[in-house]
Amino acid sequence: MIKSFYQIFLGLIFIGFISACVKHEFDQPPVTVDDPAITANATIAQLKAMHTSGNFEKITDDMIIVGVVIADDESGNFYKTIVIQDNSGGMEVKINATDQYVKYPVGRRLFIKCKGLTLGDYNGVVQIGGGTYDNNGSPALGGIEQALLDTYILPGKYNQFVTPKKLNISELTNADVSTLVELSDVEFINADAGKTYSDAVGKTTQNRTIEDCNKNLVVLRTSGYASFAGDVTPTGKGKLTAVYSIFGTTKQVYIRDPRDVVFNDTRCGGSTGNLTPNTTIAALKALHTSAFNVINTDVIIEGVVTADDQSGNFYKEINIQDATGGLGIKINVLDIYQSFPVGTKIAIRCKDLTLGDDGDTKLGGGTYQSGGKDLLGGLDATQMAANIVVNGSGMPSPKNVTIGSLGQADFSNLVVLNDVQFVTGDVGQPFADGPNKVTLNRIVEDCDGNTITIRTSGYADFASSLAPGGKGSIVGIYENFGTTKQLFIRTAADANMTGQRCSGGTGNPPLDELDEAFDGQTSDVDISIAGWYNLAASGTRLWRGKLFSGNTYAQATAFNSTDPSNTTWLITPGMDLSTPKTLSFESAKSFWKHDGLSVWISYDFNGSNIASATWTQINCTLAKEADADNTFIPSGLIDLPVTSSKAYIGFKYEGEKTVNTSTYRIDNVKIKKK
């Protein structure tokens, strides 16, 4: 049986939890995977140029190509075939085995030793395989036998995803065959919109036709064995990502799974979706008069998704909103955002669904019992597919409110609070306990002392981000827990607090002295110390705790980063420099490629916005190329300027993933009186 993306995804999460208990270096992926120690000496285009249509060519030269997998056999739409691509083009690789996505998934780089393999083609699509076999009296290209895969295919790094080439249907050429393309402003023709992708019952391959608004056509071909063969094609217009192919002179595309089809916009002819709302969210919520209400009338609502489960702060739930109010939708499916991301307008057929109370009226698929208590359950996958239709896109502006004005009419609404700040004790603290997956509350106040709870799941991908120290705005979904006002943000960027605080400062009072050895930090987890700031100015990487030979320190690196560049700052709490003081610390480097560490001081840093602050570089001794790897070098005693202003010391790391990949470490940061 072909496993679904979601099963594999859950399995990878489980593996991630296990591996979190094992020591890994920050500059290595969780699974030790590097490119093999070989070098490609030919491109895919050069290899394909050796083939003459209709022939078979056994490769006798020591040719090595390298490409990234752009399609695998996970969904079943590609059978015993993977597709790879380099900068020169793409090629199908035939493998006489199934479930090869486990070893050769989309995004993995593969080096292929071509000597001994055979080139062929299938109606114009050049392929490489293990040899030929007799197919009813005619030779055909066979796949590489499973026992020989390790001889010919040497897998390398993961997460080397190929950006699809943006084209119009009319621009597709033979040079694009077996490459990843993106077609915008396309839709299924009327006859194929709202049909299944293929014949899931009879297991026959089916064609559906895609058109653009100029009536240019391309065939979308789907195997009856694809896991999504029975899914219904969307009725809107939008973006299609696919592997381009041909069959003779017919243009064809193959998708990997339905996530490649994002058709949320109005069709060229002006229609969208197939559900027309007949009531409002407020009117639907008014039907909730008891603990649980099963909706027995043909009620259809429409709203725009204002929060989804992508960041992990909303679990198996999305929020929608129309002009009359907001509503939480409980859906017992992982990765709902893949189908209904923020900004998607959806219509929901509510008949036979259930209204319940979970801090506010919410819509679910029914009830279940836990601990002898009835609870509202989510829509299952079947209910989701049958009752929710994409009707377009759009995004409401968050409602401008104050903490004091928030009331029942705002439940489940997207709201914005202005001129607010985190209370002093929460400034510089992580939103939640990410390492231990514990949900935490932080408190936001306005300048009149009104407060609201910011509740964040320990599973949120921003759980370890630190609460900013300035004053500004915060956006989120409003709910109540009993009489407690709560706000759920979608990402750390929803807390935009860069101005001066109500009290004129940026959080905690300045420290007189500092002695930080990072002993309390967890290895391979982002640094999180009360009062400190761990911020990324470019890219997503932060300073991390590291443990080596019993010593814990802070480390930053761009090695194996997925970001184009990384600039990350580790900034001390505000320091009182009204009397003479000195700074000292130790630094070390490893795998030197560039000088990536510098030290700075600021007197106007607001606790969150690095770019708005004025920084002056501090001259000091830092680990350099000539120093031994992993050897800590003392900075010496650095005299700090005497000032009445609060001062912040910033350790700045800069690097990028291809050349400037040095790893730097700091330890034993001390600010002492002279």
Image (cartoon, rainbow, N blue to C red):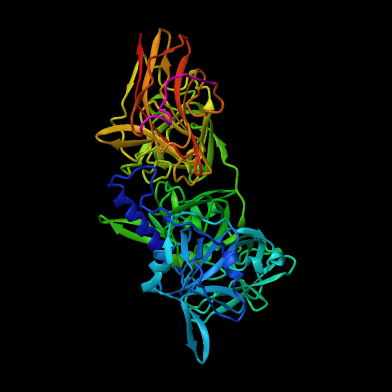
**In this view, 175 is above or below 470:** below
Q: Where is residue 178 in the image (x, y as percent from the top left)?
A: 58, 68
Q: Is residue 22 left or right of residue 173?
A: left
When asked about the image quadrant of residue 7, the answer is: bottom left
Does any portion of residue 239 appear in the rendered image? no
Left/right of residue 442 with respect to residue 167 in the rendered view: left
* Up-down relation of residue 270 to residue 659 (above or below): below
Q: Indicate the position of residue 13 as horizontal and vertical percent values.
A: 36, 54
Vertical placement of 417 versus 559: above or below?
above
User: Which residue is nearer to you in this view: 516 or 261?
Assistant: 516
State the residue lying farthest toward the front: 61
In the image, residue 375 sits, relative to residue 399, either above or below, namely below
Q: In this view, does 272 lie to the left or right of 228?
A: right
Question: What range of the chain is rendered magenta?
Answer: 615-628
Q: Position of residue 346 (x, y in %)?
A: 56, 58
- 37 or 641, nearer to the observer: 37
Quadrant where the image shows the C terminus: top left
